[in-house]
């Protein structure tokens, strides 16, 4: 695996004509400028902000030539959809088929959910506590990393093993996205298992926190520093959004749709476009979540689940992945506790699992039970937002490394 294969966006700059490569860089810069001018209201933000993010993501998120042939795309965002007569007939008969075909099986619904998550997320804690938040999130990927060799040992091929491992991110859209690319045969059962466990972990994680973090540590308050009282300006947040989106798309183009969706959603909130924010949160997020749940239920027919011997293995792997993820996050919390000379609450570590904002709420609730006067939600939200970012990075790495061998 060479550099250009691992970091596709950067590698593709050296595999195309110099004029096109230069044009991509210029358009990325232009996209950043458009977002900034939209934020400043110099240009119309309704058009400029999404347009600027789109320009940055598409010009950064290009694949090298051999990956284009594998995926069948030259452009990771838009590709002509070849619809057959048979598909059109089915779409006219089965009432949920259009929703499944046009939003579910192509990963669009995952991107819509990510836009909504971006709107409800606040990157202020990430900018206030970048080291703490990212360290915890990285340790919370323990489940994603260790589940892969376990799945290989249980008989899965690399694509299926990676798809199962991504359950450890506790990020439903990420599981959808990975299984669609790496192992479509597992798409239905692995998605059902992932979302089933996302509900179960809400009841399991509090017990795990209590078991691994003694009450006296859960009751510990974090002494405030100067930075804790500071306010992160919308200007700083929009700069972070556009830079993080562009850099991550450049490094991992296969996950560019997810990066674009999350950071664009967050930028919409920071630029203060209320109509768009309401659309993404109240329409896209809730409509996507509703149809996601409905379609998952429709896919849960006995023939699909019981007829696949892999389902039992996926149930085991899902539990292992999510359990290891929480344990890894708490280990990260203990490490920060030691680095900060005991001025930290290790229970915050569980928030590194990227099921935002649920794991952050679980951490706060566990701390509140031990000491009602302690509030750690700002630290927990920082870890949770970073968990979303690290989950997308791990997804990009798995897909980039494994896809040529699938």
Image (cartoon, rainbow, N blue to C red):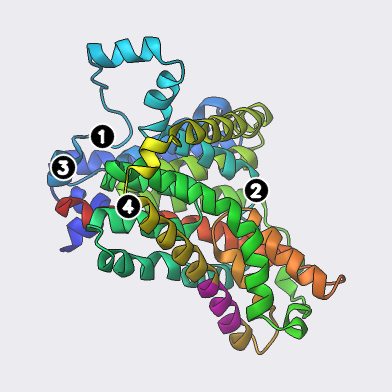
What percent of the width, then of the height, locates residue 341?
Answer: 66, 90
Q: Secondary structure at mark 1?
A: loop
Mark 4, residue position: 310
Please give the label number shown on residue 75: 1
Going from N to C along the chain, the mark reached first, 1 or 2, is 1
Residue 187: quarter of image: top left
Label 3 – label 4 distance at C-alpha = 26 Å
Going from N to C along the chain, the mark reached first, 1 or 4, is 1
Label 1 – label 2 distance at C-alpha = 32 Å
Q: Secondary structure at mark 3?
A: helix
Q: Is residue 80 left or right of residue 391?
A: left
What percent of the width, then of the height, locates residue 342?
Answer: 68, 88
Q: Nearer the viewer, residue 159 or 308?
A: 308
Going from N to C along the chain, the mark reached first, 4 or 2, is 2
Q: Residue at x 60, y 77 (%)?
A: 333
Check the image and report above or below for 344 versus 326.
below
Check the image and report above or below for 352 versus 87.
below
Report the magenta residues as a range. Answer: 327-336
């Amino acid at each position: 695996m060479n550099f250009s294969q691992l970091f596709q966006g950067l590698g593709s700059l050296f595999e195309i004509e110099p004029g096109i490569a230069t044009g991509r860089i210029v358009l990325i810069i232009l996209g950043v400028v458009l977002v900034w001018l939209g934020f400043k209201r110099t240009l119309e933000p309704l058009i400029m902000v999404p347009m600027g993010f789109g320009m940055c993501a598409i010009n950064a998120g290009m694949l090298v030539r051999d990956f284009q042939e594998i995926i069948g795309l030259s452009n990771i965002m838009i590709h002509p959809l070849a619809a057959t007569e048979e598909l059109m007939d089915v779409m006219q008969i089965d009432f949920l088929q259009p929703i499944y075909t046009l939003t579910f099986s192509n990963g669009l619904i995952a991107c819509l959910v990510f836009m909504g998550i971006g709107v409800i997320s606040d990157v202020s804690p990430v900018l206030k506590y970048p080291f703490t938040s990212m360290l915890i999130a990285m340790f919370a990927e323990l489940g994603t990393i260790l589940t892969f060799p376990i799945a290989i040992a249980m008989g899965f091929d690399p694509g299926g093993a990676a798809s199962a491992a991504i359950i450890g991110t506790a990020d439903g859209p990420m599981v959808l996205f990975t299984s669609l690319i790496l192992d479509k045969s597992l798409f239905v059962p692995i998605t059902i298992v992932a979302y089933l466990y996302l509900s179960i972990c809400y009841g399991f994680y509090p017990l795990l926190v209590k078991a691994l973090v003694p009450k006296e540590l859960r009751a510990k308050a974090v002494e405030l520093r100067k930075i804790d009282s500071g306010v992160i300006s919308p200007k700083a947040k929009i700069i972070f959004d556009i830079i993080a989106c562009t850099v991550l798309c450049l490094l991992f183009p296969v996950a560019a749709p997810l990066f674009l969706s999350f950071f664009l959603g967050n930028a919409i909130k920071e630029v203060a476009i209320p109509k768009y924010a309401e659309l993404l949160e109240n329409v896209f997020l809730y409509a996507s979540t509703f149809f996601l749940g409905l379609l998952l239920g429709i896919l849960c027919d006995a023939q699909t689940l019981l007829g696949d011997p892999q389902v039992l293995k996926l149930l085991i792997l899902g539990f292992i992945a999510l359990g290891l993820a929480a344990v890894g996050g708490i280990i990260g919390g203990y490490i920060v506790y030691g680095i900060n000379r005991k001025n930290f609450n290790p229970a915050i570590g569980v928030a590194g699992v990227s099921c935002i904002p649920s794991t952050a709420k679980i951490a706060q609730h566990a701390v509140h039970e031990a000491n009602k006067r302690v509030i750690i939600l700002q630290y927990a939200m920082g870890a949770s937002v970073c968990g979303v970012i690290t989950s997308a990075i791990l997804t990009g790495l798995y897909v980039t490394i494994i896809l040529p061998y699938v």
